Image (tube, rainbow, N blue to C red):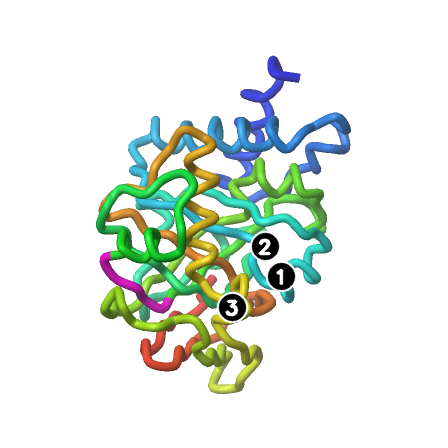
Amino acid sequence: MSANLSTLAAMLDDAARTATEATQLIETHPDLTIEDAYAIQLLNVQRRWARGERRVGYKMGLTSRAKMQQVGVSEVIWGRLTDAMRLEDGGVLSLGKYVHARVEPEIAYIIGKPLSGEVSAAEALRAVEAVAPALEIIDSRYKNFKFSLPDVIADNSSSSGFYVGSYARPDTDVGNLGIVLEVNGRPVQIGSTAAILGNPVRSLVQAARLVGRAGECLMPGDIVLAGGATAAHPLSVGEHIKCMFQKLGDVSFSVGK
């Protein structure tokens, strides 16, 4: 299997760059393991770094019951963020750059001190410089939006873009904040940050542990997206997306071609 990992990573990278569908990896490689999938993810992102993109943080995935039910899996996963994935709050999203673009509300942690390995919630919070409302654009490249757990991990856990709103103090309690996701002024998802593992800080603890296992570290300036708080909303041209977060403000964008 290891000899094929670079080829599979290149296929997924090409699919993302050209916004074209890819065949599920497990269809041709049914023995693909979770470890293989994370190796493919790293090789995939390394191709982006080689093109000049810069690492800016990590995303956590499958951290809400709604999300787990939506995709039919039950494990917390993670992916990597680059500067090219960051989008402008209030701007226009070009839908043509994506295959199956969806949006979901997130809490973003901005890291102020290095954090890695087995840590407590208190230790994790001491490493936080700020918190912020955020939206993540997820976009599985697989045909018909159908994939297994190794498939999605290899595809950078579907992470394709993100918006971060205004920063708030690091001691802001984000454990149970109301969230309303609107499309053209109409609520389509209503939820709470408590859907993120019961409290988003638990996702930050998981992030430190999981990246530590991979020999990596949350570094000052890194952004950690804690995971979707609601089911993801499929995007269509002409939509105006606005997400309001209790105590934190809002994040918005419009969807163009």
Distance between the Cα atoms at labels 1 and 3?
23 Å
Residue, x 55% and y 28% (percent of image)? 40
Disc 2 and disc 3 in contact, CB within 8 angstroms? no
Alpha carbon distance from label 2 to label 3: 26 Å
Reply above or below: 168 against 116: below
The answer to whether residue 197 is left or right of residue 45 is right
Q: Which residues are magenta?
A: 129-133
Q: Residue furthest top?
A: 3
Secondary structure under badge 2? loop
Indicate the position of residue 226 as horizontal and vertical percent values: 44, 57
Q: What residue is rendered at 50% in x and 76% in y?
A: 192
Residue with the mark numbered 1 = 67
- In the rendered image, which residue does mark 3 sit on? 237
Q: Residue at x 60, y 13 (%)?
A: 3
Comparing marks 1 and 3, which lies closer to the viewer? 1
The disc, 2 or 3, on the residue closer to the chain's N-terminal end is 2
In space, the residues marked 2 and 1 are separated at their CA atoms by: 6 Å
Q: Earlier in the sequence, mark 2 or mark 1?
A: 2
Which residue is drawn at the image coordinates 37% and 49% (left, top)? 85
Q: Main secondary structure of the magenta part?
A: strand
For the residue pair 107 and 4, the one nearer the viewer reads as: 107
Mark sitting on residue 62: 2
Residue 246 in the image: above or below residue 111: below
Q: Nearer the viewer, residue 26 or 145?
A: 26
CB-based contact (under 8 Å), mark 2 and mark 1:
yes
Q: Is 130 inside the magenta-drawn segment? A: yes
Mark closer to the chain start, 1 or 3: 1
Above or below, 106 against 126 in this view is below
